[in-house]
């Protein structure tokens, strides 16, 4: 015989649970987790369940009772006030006392004599005493005395039927033979910025106010007020390390660089050092640490690029040749992404016999920069590195430096992107950049927010990157830039732009490719950082709105609203009493109009009841009183509405 024959309850299909508990789910401090499970037993006895949970720093389990939903499905919710890991599981048991109380009521209605039933109840109460506190013990003993006193029959009947009796039955159940779910599950709770952030990316070497001059960290400091003014809170830099000379690329990715060409920052490593060194043209380590401190004064957090690749001049190539893939002719296999070729970059080979030392060294890079004050890393092409390495490395870094955020820059196959998120990446790049039609956007958002992905995959929406100049923006149409930005910032609670290319609407493509002509990946550029336009105004207002409207600080609370117009996208977001309705005109050229279905049932409003709709971007207020309300967006006007519904 196996198992405990006295455990009659089945507990199964617990959610959320990722791959049978292999991976943890994710939340942000202050959020809650709703746990569901199927709980049932043989026969007709009542069953009950509870969720057990504890923070990793605690030994004692807390619990919250589960409530029935339908068809033996139960649920409960508990809060996550602290960062770090929480453990949770589900237990279920046969509740004999509750079964007895219901049977007692039926027999009482049938006018049966309840003498024996009262004695049974007294026995149930007797079993509760060891769990009860002193005050409850006193009251329970009083009730037991009445139930066993034949002269107090009527009083005993009333006590059994009372809410007080049911309260004790719920509070002190007999779980001696409870069935526990077959595994403990985990949720990792991040700091707030993991779930809500606005990223701004630029190349530090293009920060100089003087055309033709290489930018420095001091130049970056001068730009901090501008970036803070338009509302961003994460400032992300592509690699800031020494750049290799061997096979250095020239402007627009030409194979042979000319004298004075700056090279690609992703070709990391030279005689001046590798991943723990800084490009001399940018400044010193002390300059960088000063920049980190100055950024913090503007509520900006610096994010670094972690790119696991080396130029042929990287110190690793000589010190650890076993970490690279050598070809029969004695040359090293450079990185390839057909038809692209990266002669200036040597990918590290994770399939080498010295893999353990390789892992330790790569983690030490992250440790080093964490020691300098960095807590956010954007990881370049993580999908081309070992899954096992990422799971180990991220866990170890976050254990040593709690609150460290990792953004996965993986534009690759869906299953690979999902696996990286499961392995520990805090945030993930997405396919948003290529989702353009109304159908595509709704389908993709529903996948991200309504499927199992919502438990572990935190999307970070980018309308462009320094690698990608999407085809939809290559004509420079202002309405497209505004709409694509607006959707990134309101569909997702985490988003970013590559600037100042984006807000200045620079769009000239490399012919036939989704890349920028004269890309900053290959050369220093000069920008007019003081320029303002309608798009910078929209960015400033939307970022300000995100900070004061909790509904915009969540991704998974989205509900799409019907418009019956494929060129008008409408979606509603709610957090507590904050109600946001977004309207986007996907047609950049013409006038579009429709009636939008407003979710009155979510707002608690009855048809015919007036309510105010305030447009955050224009300052206009409208009075609506119907479920279907008319919207019209002109070709010359802003292609979006950001409505706050005031109820």
Image (cartoon, rainbow, N blue to C red):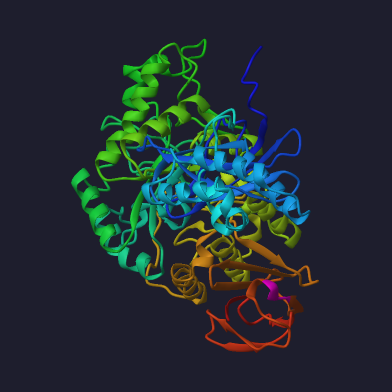
Up-down relation of residue 385 to residue 452 (above or below): above
| Magenta span contains residue 598 | yes
Residue 69 as seen in the image, left or right of residue 54: right
Residue 187 as seen in the image, left or right of residue 182: left
Give the residue at x 36% y 38%: 58
Provide residue 555's location: percent of width, then percent of height: 57, 57
Q: Is residue 275 visible?
A: no
Give the residue at x 62% y 18%: 3
- Residue occupying the far front of the picture: 151
The one of 460 and 514 positioned closer to us in this rendering: 460
| Magenta span contains residue 157 | no
Provide residue 265's location: percent of width, then percent of height: 40, 41
Give the residue at x 64% y 68%: 572
Residues in magenta, as a range: 597-601
Which part of the image, by quadrant, shows the C terminus?
Answer: bottom right
Q: Is residue 572 visible?
A: yes
């Amino acid at each position: 015989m196996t198992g405990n024959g006295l455990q009659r309850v089945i507990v199964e299909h617990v959610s959320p649970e990722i791959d049978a508990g292999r991976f943890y789910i994710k939340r942000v401090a202050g959020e809650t987790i709703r746990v569901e499970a199927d709980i049932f037993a043989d026969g007709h006895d009542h069953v009950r369940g509870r969720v057990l949970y504890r923070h990793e720093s605690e030994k004692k389990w807390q619990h919250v009772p589960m409530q029935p939903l339908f068809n033996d499905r139960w649920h409960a919710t508990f809060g996550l006030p602290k960062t770090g890991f929480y453990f949770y599981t589900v237990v279920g048991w046969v509740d004999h006392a509750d079964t007895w109380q219901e049977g007692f009521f039926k027999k009482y209605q049938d006018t049966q004599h309840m003498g024996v039933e009262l004695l049974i109840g007294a026995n149930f109460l007797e079993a509760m005493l060891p769990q009860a506190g002193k005050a409850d013990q006193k009251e329970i003993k009083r009730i037991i005395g009445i139930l066993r006193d034949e002269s107090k029959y009527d009083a005993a009947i009333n006590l059994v039927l009372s809410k007080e009796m049911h309260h004790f039955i719920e509070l002190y159940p007999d779980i001696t033979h409870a069935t526990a779910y077959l595994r403990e599950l985990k949720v990792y709770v991040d700091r707030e910025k993991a779930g809500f952030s606005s990223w701004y990316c630029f190349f530090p070497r293009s920060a100089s106010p003087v055309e033709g001059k290489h930018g420095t960290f001091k130049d970056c400091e001068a730009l901090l007020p501008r970036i803070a003014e338009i509302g961003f809170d994460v400032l992300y830099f592509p690699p800031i390390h020494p750049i290799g000379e061997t096979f250095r690329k020239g402007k627009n990715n030409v194979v042979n660089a000319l004298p004075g060409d700056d090279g690609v920052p992703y070709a990391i490593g030279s005689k001046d050092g590798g991943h723990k060194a800084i490009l001399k043209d940018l400044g010193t380590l002390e300059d960088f640490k000063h920049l980190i401190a100055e950024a913090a004064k503007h509520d900006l957090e610096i994010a670094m690029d972690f790119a696991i690749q080396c130029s042929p001049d990287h110190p690793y190539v000589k010190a650890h040749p076993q970490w690279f893939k050598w070809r029969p002719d004695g040359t090293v296999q450079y990185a390839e992404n057909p038809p692209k070729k990266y002669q200036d970059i040597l990918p590290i080979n994770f399939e080498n016999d010295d893999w353990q030392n390789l892992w330790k060294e790569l983690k030490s890079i992250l440790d080093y920069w964490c020691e300098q004050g960095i807590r956010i890393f954007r990881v370049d092409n993580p999908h081309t590195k070992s899954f096992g390495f990422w799971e180990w490395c991220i866990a170890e870094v976050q254990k040593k430096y709690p609150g460290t955020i990792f953004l996965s820059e993986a534009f690759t196959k869906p299953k690979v992107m999902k696996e990286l998120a499961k392995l520990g990446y805090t945030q993930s790049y997405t396919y948003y950049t290529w989702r353009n039609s109304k159908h595509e956007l709704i389908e993709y958002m529903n996948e991200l927010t309504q499927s199992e992905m919502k438990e572990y995959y935190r999307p970070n929406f980018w309308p462009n990157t320094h690698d990608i100049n999407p085809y939809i923006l290559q004509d420079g149409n202002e309405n497209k830039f505004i709409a694509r930005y607006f959707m990134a910032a309101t569909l997702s609670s985490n988003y970013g732009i590559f600037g100042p290319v984006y807000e200045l609407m620079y769009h000239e493509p490399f012919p036939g490719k989704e890349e920028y002509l004269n890309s900053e990946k290959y050369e220093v550029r000069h920008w007019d950082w003081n320029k303002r336009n309608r798009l910078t105004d929209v960015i400033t207002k939307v970022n300000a709105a995100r900070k004061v409207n909790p509904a915009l600080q969540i991704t998974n609370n989205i509900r799409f609203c019907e418009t019956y117009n494929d060129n008008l996208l409408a979606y509603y977001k709610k957090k507590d009493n904050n109600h946001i309705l977004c309207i986007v005109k996907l047609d950049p050229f013409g006038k579009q109009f429709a009636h939008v279905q407003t979710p009155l049932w979510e707002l608690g409003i009855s048809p015919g009841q007036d309510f105010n709709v305030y447009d955050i971007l224009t300052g206009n207020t409208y009075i609506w009183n119907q479920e279907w309300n008319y919207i019209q967006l002109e070709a010359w006007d802003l292609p979006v509405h950001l409505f706050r519904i005031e109820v």
